[in-house]
């Protein structure tokens, strides 16, 4: 199955991202990614199903970590407290490498197919968090609503983190955004 | 351009929905829809770009109505009050025909491509509501968050309305869901 290549997946990911930013996602081939990484296309396909998967390879494990954090929240925690624990886990996992996150976001924003894939990923995350809340005994209606609200906070906070020139911590932005949602919904709805 | 057909678009929509439910979306052709409606494929294409558009033809006007309702809210209204006005408009437009809404939902749920299209529609709605809030002078971060929260309420309330055996009014379910979101986020996040 070919010789062992040190950190092949990391090199492929870096090469892919550099090419996606330089040329655009559609204009980049797997052969070019492999070449840039000093590897073969065959090695590429040992790590990724296709060039899109380079951008989404972490999705399943991210979702798993968020659900695990939600499940690990104390039994007495409110639904939004459990969601906050999941958001903290997301911040820990995604908040390390802002430069990579920015590049990834710019590639995704520029391509309709990738934007759709990202939407599907977030819908899947919302469904998984709602399932997790139901397993914690949260009633159906509240479970879906808390999960959707959590994903709303995730999206807005992540975007804010990527663009804020003050470069705050992602966990801080997540918590601020959750507080902001509380303030927004607490304001009287009927005038 | 062919003779005038009374209510051709309504007949085509009804025929399409019946076939999508009977055979599945993928197994239905435009020729079959036209035949069932007693019309020609040529007439079909005068009203819809393709068989998918039968399900999504109302999206743009729905989004327009929601944004108009948001814009018509009193200048003093809080962001979530303006969002609530948009949700009320959605309830008025969508809440008339539960049987049709249920059929449409079952067709969309059964097909990955249609589910993606629905996600894109909701993302577009969220962006349009956020833009509307910004035009009302709401700060960027709050505008996105309120819009995302509004779409979260919309999704959960719509789903609940379709499945609740008590058949409540959609506007009532929307308002309940918004209240529920307020209660969820007001519960202490830190234990």
Image (cartoon, coloured by chain):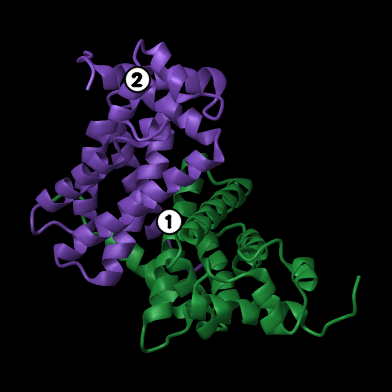
Chain colours: A purple, B green
Q: Chain of mark 2?
A: A
Q: Which residue is mark 1?
A: B149
- The count of marks equals 2
Tell me: residue B6, above or below residue B61: below
* Label 2: which secondary element: helix
- Circles 1 and 2: CB atoms closer than 8 Å: no
Q: Residue at x 26, y 60 (%)?
A: A130
Closer to us: A184 or B34:
B34
- What residue do we see at 21% from left, 39% from top? A89
Asked whether residue A189 is in view, the answer is no
Q: Position of residue A13 (x, y in %)?
A: 35, 22
Residue A116 screen position, x and y as percent: 49, 46
Question: Which mark is nearer the camera, 1 or 2?
Answer: 2
Residue B40 location, quadrant? bottom right
Q: CA distance from mark 1 to mark 2?
A: 37 Å
**Which residue occupies the extreme front position in the image?**
A1
Taking the spot 29% from the left edge, 41% from the top edge, the residue there is: A175
Q: Is residue B74 left or right of residue A172?
A: right
Q: Quadrant of residue B180?
A: bottom left
x 90%, y 75%: residue: B2
Instruction: Report whether B57 appears left or right of A109.
Output: right
On the question of residue B91 being in view, the answer is: yes
Q: Is residue B50 left or right of residue A63?
A: right
According to the picture, the residue beneath numbered tag 2 turns out to be A12
In this rendering, the answer to whether A126 lies above or below A104 is below
Q: Residues within 10 Å of mark 1 (few under 14, many from 20)?
A: many
- Give the answer, above or below, for where B83 lies relative to B138: below
* Disc 2 packing (10 Å; few <14; some 14–19; many ≥20): many
Q: Residue furthest bottom?
A: B166
Q: Chain of mark 1?
A: B
């Amino acid at each position: 199955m070919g010789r062992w290549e040190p950190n092949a997946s990391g090199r492929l990911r870096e090469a892919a991202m550099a090419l996606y930013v330089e040329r655009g996602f559609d204009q980049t081939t797997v052969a070019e990614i492999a070449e840039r990484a000093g590897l073969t296309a065959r090695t590429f396909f040992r790590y990724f199903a296709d060039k899109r998967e380079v951008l989404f390879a972490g999705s399943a494990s991210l979702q798993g970590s968020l659900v695990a954090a939600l499940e690990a929240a104390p039994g007495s925690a409110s639904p939004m407290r459990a969601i906050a624990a999941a958001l903290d886990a997301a911040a820990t996992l995604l908040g390390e490498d802002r430069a990579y996150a920015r590049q990834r976001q710019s590639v995704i924003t520029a391509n309709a197919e990738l934007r759709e894939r990202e939407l599907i990923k977030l819908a899947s995350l919302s469904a998984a968090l709602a399932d997790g809340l139901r397993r914690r005994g949260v009633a159906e209606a509240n479970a879906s609503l808390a999960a959707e609200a959590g994903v709303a906070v995730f999206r807005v906070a992540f975007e804010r983190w990527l663009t804020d020139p003050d470069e705050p911590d992602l966990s801080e932005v997540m918590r601020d955004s959750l507080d902001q949602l509380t303030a927004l919904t607490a304001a009287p709805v009927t005038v």
